[in-house]
Image (cartoon, coloured by chain):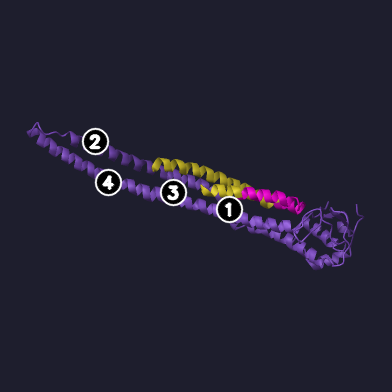
Chain colours: A yellow, B purple
Amino acid sequence: MVGTAQLSFALKTLRERWDETKGYWNDKVARDFEKNHLLPLESQSNTAIRGMEKLNEVLHKLRQDCS
Amino acid sequence: MSQGANVRSVDALKDFKVTLITFAEDAQIALGSAEMEIRQVRNWLQRDQLTYWQSQVKRCTERLAMARTELHRRQLSKANSDAISDTEQKEAVRDGQRRLREAEEKVERIKRWIPILEDAISEYNSQAQPLGDRLSGSFVASLHVLDRMISALDSYLAMAPPSTTVLPTPGPATLETSSSSSSEARSTVAAVSTTGSRPEEPLPAAESTPAGAELAGKAEGSLDNLDPAHLLQQKSKLRLPERT
């Protein structure tokens, strides 16, 4: 599934950039921003990626079985 | 105890805001691609494949009927002559039966897969929907947090007077408020640059640091009420501590 790789790469880039940004912005607002905005976003993205991977397995078997 | 704002580069925040927007765009595209693939597979299975193999069942049924008719005709002819063979017709019937069985099995298999696919899609949707909802909803709030922080820093920089004393040593400036409500707040405000420069730069003007202290104070809570006029009022209440 194309979306899996794209979302995984986007998420990896986001995390890397945030880790870089934390070098320049390190206070309570930054920590709250990470806790309340970025971590949920990462968690939901990872859940979506797992969903895509699982669906991809089903689609692969389906194509093999029904072609 | 109050905690200070520690921002070493406003450009870093601006860059990260761009990264966040790019992520949202990429994530939306990824979710859209998955949705498109789901639609394509669903159409392929339920429309193309099912329709095709159902038509194959019908076609094979007709061919088998024709083969059986031909075999029956041949067997009637064979009864009158030993020279006539019905081997070819029997083979055609067996071949027709095999083809019909394969087509029927295919239809059954596809019908079995339809609910499995729908279950898998439902499960995927339940896992992907929270991200989709966030990207189209509360994600804006995430951008607003960055916007408010960037705006506050820009305001702080705009208020810095042109003739200022640059502290010679790099590193954070420590400010102490003299107001009773924030007497314990020792705010660390790092160098802020609008030119893309990053850490280890000289600190901004001494006169500008009260605004930084205000920024630090606001950083602990909401930045909504951080306005330049209020920052200017606070300037007279703040003093610079001794440089370390």
Three-letter code for the amino acid on which mark 3 is drawn: Val
State how far apart marks 3 and 1 are (Cα): 21 Å
Q: State the residue in front, B92 or B168.
A: B168
What is the crowding at mark 2: few (fewer than 14 residues within 10 Å), some, or many (at least 20)? some
Badge number at residue B156: none
State how far apart marks 2 and 4 are (Cα): 17 Å
Residue identifier under label 3? B41
Q: Which of marks 3 and 1 is nearer the N terminus?
A: 1
State how far apart marks 3 and 2 are (Cα): 34 Å
Q: Do the residues labelled 1 and 4 touch (CB within 8 Å)?
A: no
Dominant secondary structure of the magenta stretch?
Answer: helix
Which residue is located at x 25 percent, y 43 percent? B61
> Is residue B161 shown left or right of residue A15?
right
Are discs 3 and 2 both within one chain? yes
Q: Are marks 3 and 4 in contact (CB under 8 Å)?
A: no
Per the rendered image, the range of residues in magenta is A10-33
Pinpoint the chain carrying mark 1. Answer: B
Q: Which residue lies furthest to the left in this view?
A: B80
Q: Is mark 1 on a helix, strand or loop?
A: helix
Are discs 1 and 2 both within one chain? yes
Which residue is located at x 81 percent, y 68 percent? B229
Inspect the magenta stretch and tell me whether residue B63 lies in it. Answer: no
Q: Can residue B127 be seen in this view?
A: no
State how far apart marks 1 and 2 are (Cα): 54 Å
Q: State the residue in front, B178 or B55.
A: B55
Three-letter code for the amino acid on which mark 4 is drawn: Lys
Badge number at residue B58: 4
* Percent coordinates x, y for residue B68 in the rendering: 19, 39
